[in-house]
Image (cartoon, rainbow, N blue to C red):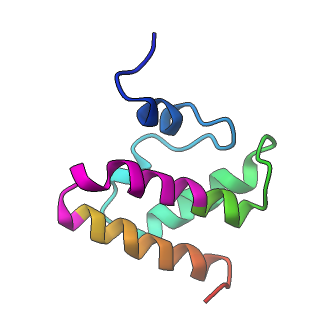
Amino acid sequence: MATRRWSKGVTRNSNALDLDPDVFTQDDPRAIARSLKRSAERSTRRKSSPYRSAMSMLTFYINRAGKNLPKKQLRVLEQAKDALRAEYGRR
């Protein structure tokens, strides 16, 4: 069954990453970053490096859900970008 919003379907059924359930609803930016890193490194279907795949999924979610997210959660997700860079030593 098709979802109402295509971006929700992409997040839920990504061809590149198998995401943990509710990864983007967590309150801890480091936990989000670790989860994305874990998913990206386990994936055998991604087309890019684990870092780029994880960052792309996070950015995609922020861009698509951003205007509907509470400001607090949007701040957490933006902080997760910095945490993901730190996880990969890309500061």
Look at 42% across and 34% down and name the residue there: 8
Taking 79 as reference, is 6 above or below it?
above
Which of the 4 quarters of the picture holds residue 16?
top right
Look at 74% across and 56% down and name the residue there: 41
Per the rendered image, the range of residues in magenta is: 56-72
**Residue 56 appears at what percent x and percent y?**
59, 58
Q: In this view, does 66 lie to the left or right of 71?
A: right
Q: In this view, does 5 lie to the left or right of 39?
A: left
Point out the image quarter for the N terminus: top left
**Residue 79 appears at what percent x and percent y?**
39, 76
**Magenta stretch holds residue 39:** no
Point out the image quarter for the C terminus: bottom right
> Who is closer to the viewer here, 38 or 2?
2
Q: In this view, does 4 lie to the left or right of 71?
A: right
Which of the 4 quarters of the picture holds residue 34?
bottom right
Q: Is residue 83 left or right of residue 24?
A: right
Look at 67% across and 77% down and name the residue there: 88
Look at 76% across and 47% down and name the residue there: 46
Magenta stretch prevailing secondary structure: helix
In this view, which residue lies farthest toward the bottom? 91
**Residue 66 appears at what percent x and percent y?**
31, 56
**Magenta stretch holds residue 58:** yes
Taking 24 as reference, is 7 above or below it?
above
Taking 45 as reference, is 72 above or below it?
below
> Who is closer to the viewer here, 37 or 90?
90
